[in-house]
Amino acid sequence: MNGEPVIEVKGLQKSFGELQVLKGIDTVINKGDVVFVIGPSGSGKSTFLRCLNLLENPTGGQILFEGTDITDPGNDINLHRRKMGMVFQQFNLFPHLSIMKNLTIAPIKLLGKSKEEAEKTAYTLLERVGLANRANAYPNQLSGGQKQRIAIVRALCMSPDVMLFDEPTSALDPEMVGEVLNVMRDLANDGMTMVVVTHEMAFAKEIASRVLFMDGGYILEENTPEELFGNPKNERLKSFLSKVI
Amino acid sequence: MPQWLQNLADRFYTNFISENRWKYIADGFIVTVEVTFFAVLIGIILGFIIAVIRSTHDKTGKLKIPDFICKVYLTVIRGTPSVLQLLIIYFVVFGSVNISKVLVAIIAFGINSGAYVAEVIRSGIMSIDKGQTEAGRSLGFTYAQTMIYIILPQALKNVLPALGNEVIVLLKETSICGYIALQDLTKGGDIIRSRTYDAFMPLIAVALIYLVMVMLLQRLVAGLERRLNSSER
Ligand SMILES: Nc1ncnc2c1ncn2[C@@H]1O[C@H](COP(=O)(O)OP(=O)(O)OP(=O)(O)O)[C@@H](O)[C@H]1O
Ligand SMILES: [Mg+2]
């Protein structure tokens, strides 16, 4: 059902030693939302995203995933992470495993799927992103765009409830950006809940249901893409947009 | 037969055939192989455990006490001569018990090589990009599962040549077994020398045997490396 909260962020804070990067973030990501996070370099976008699945440990506040406070140390974060797919700027495919093994290792080891079952799912998803013919290749035989599409499929193979993207196209040659954005667009159209950190403003305008502008450790403005890009209210957002667009 | 050839044949006969002296070398060879093989096994297991403890501590700050114990062990083993370690384990640690010298040597060299293997494997683990751990953890793998399925296979592959070298070093290092009167290959050759008063024949023979073993090991490692690499092309 659309509209149910998937992730609720309450007063999230994160410091690295003396440096406080997140000073109090509040937001709710609902089922089917495609939330884009924008902001200047160093504003804490990646840190925010990585706090959502606890790759970074918050130093304050709460993160509720499907109603459970995952910052509570009594919670097994590994169980929750299975349902939160993550895609990295640097792809981070496993170079010692074939593409098929990259895609099936987690479903087999963690979800107890049989090899056949896991490969069937992987194969269907590979066909969707047009890479079914590369199942037996190794990551370093692929182009950057292909690697990132595989990385997305790897996360999807766990049938996650939400997908987190940290600048998925920033490490790509320009001619390969489109193929990755196409896959993300398909996912959004299929109703996947997504949180995307990006510098691709045009893409944000196109598919976001909501855009967050972060700076100085806070969300300074949060709105539909039409409003946020067309009629920005925050001064820093205005000057940011004037620089990037 | 020319005189020099006749001479060589005579010396060969005295050193290896008469009184079945070749047996010193054959028996010594078996001891050397035995000690090396099992010491390598112990060294790899020990080194592996230590490497995982140390790198887990480096990455997460956990396991403070085990890490400290490992550091003491590494410092002591790498800071003292291996002959002395062998002597101490034989005369001090096992001084009052009746235990086979081969076993003592296996334990001593195993403990010794564990220290070197540990640092080799640790450097392999630390060389793997942090993004690999993050990718593993983000899928829901625990720290241990990420280590086993993702980090260690890559780390071990990277350090395989260095590990092969470690085996070669250890094989040669076992030639100090004579210090506890264990008759390994080197000692075997030396016993023949002391019986026949001919140093050249037995010592050169022993040296050649070591050389052949080392060269075989080198080829083995190279072959293994090729096979592992081809799986990624
Ligand atoms: N592990 C860390 N240790 C110390 N400081 C960190 C760490 N990770 C991030 N920071 C600091 O936190 C701040 C925010 O970093 P973050 O990567 O979240 O920014 P960002 O908005 O994603 O920037 P970019 O657009 O460049 O990716 C930066 O000043 C960065 O140097
Ligand atoms: Mg970033």
Image (tube, helix red, strand yellow):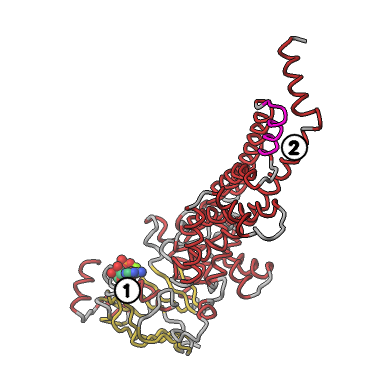
Tell me: is circle 1 under 8 Å from ligand 1.
Answer: yes
Q: Chain of mark 1?
A: A
Q: Which residues are magenta?
A: B186-198
What x and y, as percent, mark residue B62? Answer: 46, 72
The answer to whether residue A199 of the structure is visible from this angle is no
Which residue lies under the disc numbered 2? B24
Residue B120 or A143: which is nearer the viewer?
B120
Quadrant where the image shows the N terminus of chain B? top right
Say which amino acid is labelled 1: Phe
Magenta stretch, main secondary structure, is helix
Q: Nearer the viewer, residue A137 or B50?
A: B50
Q: Residue furthest right?
A: B19
Q: Position of residue A94 (x, y in %)?
A: 53, 60
Residue at the spot 68% in from the left edge and 44% down from the top edge = B32
Q: Is residue A213 left or right of residue B35?
A: left
Looking at the rendered structure, the kind of residue marked 2 is: Tyr
